[in-house]
């Protein structure tokens, strides 16, 4: 069994699968079973006291440092990986894409660098929740993401660049996208949305997005929109919920105008 070969150094990392902030979702029962099995393979050492099969996930914070080990790809039954709120460094290992049922990847609030691996698009079977916010990821988005319908995609507060319009499109079903606080640069005028989405959350603030807000956005079931601090121009389309958002959802653009901002000249 591969676990026999694990360096003891990795023990705290394994334990962290069961340690997450109180606000986060609880462990998947199958993960828990696998993890408890890992625990017993280590003779239930006292440094993992929180691995109690009678309780749900523990609420603790470990300051994990170092890279995400690529051996995680060997945990083939893993469905959720939450390593958020640590101090992990290095890049996201390609091997995560070899876990067939992985449906939730939470690596937010670490110090990860490098590009987002293109191979993560292979996990597209399961309405993947990919939460990578608050890191130092850089470079362009992998082109493979054009073919993925994420359940939720949060890339906010990184150093990502280039075209993020590949995340959108008339046939896309992703309804919760946060690309805010990056350096994305693309023309919003040409972006299409699926008009039959039942809800849509779009966080795009603090980028270098240019062009105008497409008229079709007025026909969407928008729950939330923030396009502030970009380089947009032109009139905010009238209709839908677009005028119900606070002016701060639109301010600090190049020449965006119309309600709830000042009227166009
Ligand atoms: C993690 O690090 C922070 C800041 O260095 C510290 O305040 C906190 O107590 C540490 N938490 C644990 C569980 O060690
Ligand atoms: C993984 O899942 C399969 C099928 O559900 C099961 O047979 C196997 O025992 C599981 N492996 C582990 C390590 O839990
Ligand atoms: C929009 O989404 C709906 C529901 O998910 C889907 O049935 C439809 O085919 C999509 N539209 C396009 C143009 O792909
Ligand atoms: C939009 O984002 C800006 C910048 O982050 C923020 O100041 C503003 O409060 C946000 N507005 C809304 C309506 O969320």
Image (cartoon, grey):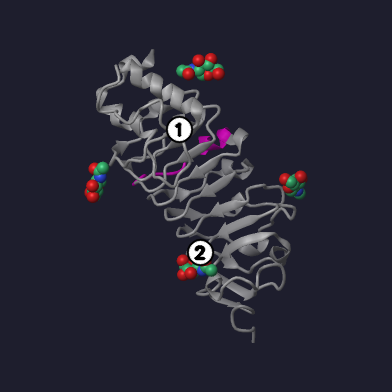
- The residue that disc 2 covers is 205
Q: Is residue 167 visible?
A: yes
Residue at coordinates 47% horizontally, 64% vertically from top-left? 206
Q: Which mark is residue 254?
A: none
Point out residue 104 in the picture as x, y percentages from the top left corner: 51, 38
Residue at coordinates 65% horizontally, 69% vertically from top-left? 242
Tag 1's secondary structure?
Answer: helix
Point out residue 194 in the picture as x, y percentages from the top left corner: 71, 53
Q: Quadrant of the N terminus?
A: top left
Assess disc 1: are there few (<14), some (14-19) or many (≥20) residues with their C-alpha within 10 Å of its C-alpha.
some
- Residue closer to the observer: 155 or 241: 241
Point out residue 250 in the picture as x, y percentages from the top left corner: 56, 72
Tell me the CA gap for discs 2 and 1. 29 Å
Q: Is 119 included in the stretch rendered in magenta?
A: yes
189 to the left or right of 51: right
**Is the CB–ligand 4 distance for label 2 below 8 Å?**
yes
* Total numbered circles: 2
Q: Quadrant of the C terminus?
A: bottom right
Point out residue 14 in the picture as x, y percentages from the top left corner: 35, 29
148 to the left or right of 16: right
- Residue closer to the observer: 68 or 23: 23
Q: Is residue 74 visible?
A: no
- The residue that disc 1 covers is 94
Image: magenta residue range? 111-123
Q: Based on the displayed image, in which of its 4 quarters is residue 126 positioned? A: top right
Q: Which residue reaches farthest bottom? A: 265
Residue at coordinates 60% horizontally, 70% vertically from top-left? 245
Tag 2's secondary structure?
Answer: loop
- Residue closer to the observer: 228 or 84: 84
Give the answer, above or below, for where 33 lies relative to 114: above
177 to the left or right of 96: right
């Amino acid at each position: 069994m591969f676990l026999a070969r694990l360096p003891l150094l990795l023990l705290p990392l394994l334990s962290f699968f069961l340690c997450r902030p109180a606000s986060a979702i609880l462990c998947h029962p199958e993960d828990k079973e696998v993890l408890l099995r890992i625990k017993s393979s280590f003779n239930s050492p006292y440094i993992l006291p929180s691995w109690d099969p009678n309780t749900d996930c523990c609420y603790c914070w470990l300051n994990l440092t170092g890279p995400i080990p690529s051996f995680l790809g060997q945990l083939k039954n893993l469905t959720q990986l939450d390593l958020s709120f640590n101090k992990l460094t290095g890049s996201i290992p390609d091997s995560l894409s070899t876990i067939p049922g992985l449906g939730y990847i939470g690596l937010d609030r670490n110090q990860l660098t490098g590009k987002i691996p293109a191979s993560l698009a292979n996990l597209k079977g399961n309405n993947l929740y990919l939460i990578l916010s608050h890191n130092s990821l850089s470079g362009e988005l992998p082109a493979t993401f054009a073919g993925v319908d994420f359940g939720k995609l949060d890339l906010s507060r990184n150093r990502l660049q280039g075209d993020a319009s590949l995340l959108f499109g008339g046939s896309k079903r992703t309804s919760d996208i946060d690309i805010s606080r990056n350096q994305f640069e693309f023309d919003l005028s040409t972006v299409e949305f699926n008009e039959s989405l039942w809800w849509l959350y779009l966080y795009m603030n603090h980028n270098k997005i240019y062009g105008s807000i497409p008229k079709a956005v007025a026909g969407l079931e928008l729950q939330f929109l923030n396009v502030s601090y970009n380089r947009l121009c032109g009139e905010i389309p009238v209709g839908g919920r677009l005028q119900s958002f606070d002016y701060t959802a639109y301010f600090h653009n190049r020449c965006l105008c119309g309600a709830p901002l000042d009227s166009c000249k």
